[in-house]
Image: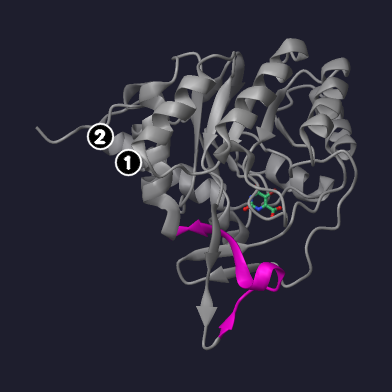
Amino acid sequence: MVSTRTTIGSFQFDNCLMNAAGVYCMTREELAAIDQSAAGSFVTKTGTLKERPGNPEPRYADTALGSINSMGLPNLGYHYYLDYVMELQDRPKSKNHFLSLVGMSPEETHTILKSVEASDYKGLVELNLSCPNVPGKPQIAYDFETTDQILSEVFSYFTKPLGIKLPPYFDIVHFDQAAAIFNKYPLAFVNCVNSIGNGLVVEDETVLIKPKNGFGGIGGDYIKPTALANVHAFYKRLNPSIQIIGTGGVKTGRDAFEHILCGASMVQIGTALHQEGPQIFERITKELEEIMTEKGYESLEDFRGKLNYKA
Ligand code: RRO
């Protein structure tokens, strides 16, 4: 019998597949649909201190090869999501969940995380250091000094399991520099990758989305090689206690298999979930199990990180 069970820190999951933050996670109804699907967990929409309406529509478009979005961090406020995951954690046989958070400034981030620290929430937190779509706010994790400063302060008071959502990096030196910073902290995981920021998709003579004259985060097929590179680069560089969540370009069991082969302990699905809906988890789980059966792998441990190089 093959199994796609996994763990992040001390948390167990019956399936390694789940949604990526931003997709199917804005409301309790959407989150409940993921919770009741074959997914092993869910992550909430990134919650900020106060509710935000986000950028003007149209702000998300599917394309032949994936998606472009400039949602602009619309969310119902972190308390909405914190209340829901706390409600679920008290139910018998509840799955474990991820609460995605970030402030509009480092001060706001600390206010939110101190509130979560003081709460009865016992699950995982994903700090989003990579939103590409808020005008005037750069992707935090491209600024190594600020990232180091935020993490240093966070871990002076935050004791619950916390990981970070990263933007894609594109240079070996950046992998080295980023990993050296992350290795200083007791992170539970890093999640590679958020959308590739500020792409532009043109149809006929016009952009596809309204905010920022059409510039937006790119997801789907376009980003799988970049996502796999980031997963593997950090798998090779980070302390073994820091696990990797792989996100980017997953729409088949084969894609999930490749993320795990590159080092992922959990695999998130964004663009393809948006296109196909929560029943995608059943399909991709089955496809992944078929690949594992064919290859004689019974568990993810049998092949995680065991990517082969050319001699
Ligand atoms: O809401 C968004 O515009 C958004 C966020 Br917070 C993010 O982290 N990644 C993304 O592609 N869009």
Label 2 crowding class (10 Å Cα cut-off): few <14, some 14-19, many 20+?
few
Q: Nearer the viewer, residue 105 or 97?
A: 105
**Residue at horizontal 67 percent and vertical 55 percent from the top:** 133
Q: Amino acid at mark 1?
A: Ile
Q: Which residues are magenta?
A: 206-221
**Residue at horizontal 88 percent and vertical 16 percent from the top:** 118
The answer, for residue 43, to whether it is visible in the render is yes
> What SS does tag 1 mark?
helix
Instruction: Give the quadrant of the C terminus.
Output: top left
Q: Nearer the viewer, residue 188 or 277?
A: 188
Number of callouts in the render? 2
Q: Are marks 2 and 1 in contact (CB under 8 Å)?
A: yes
Q: Percent x, y for residue 112? A: 84, 29
Q: Amino acid at mark 2?
A: Lys
Q: Quadrant of residue 310?
A: top left
Residue carrying label 2: 295
Q: Percent x, y for residue 265? A: 47, 28
Label 1 crowding class (10 Å Cα cut-off): few <14, some 14-19, many 20+?
some
Vertical comparison of 225 with 165: above or below: below
Q: Nearer the viewer, residue 153 or 287?
A: 153
Residue carrying label 1: 291
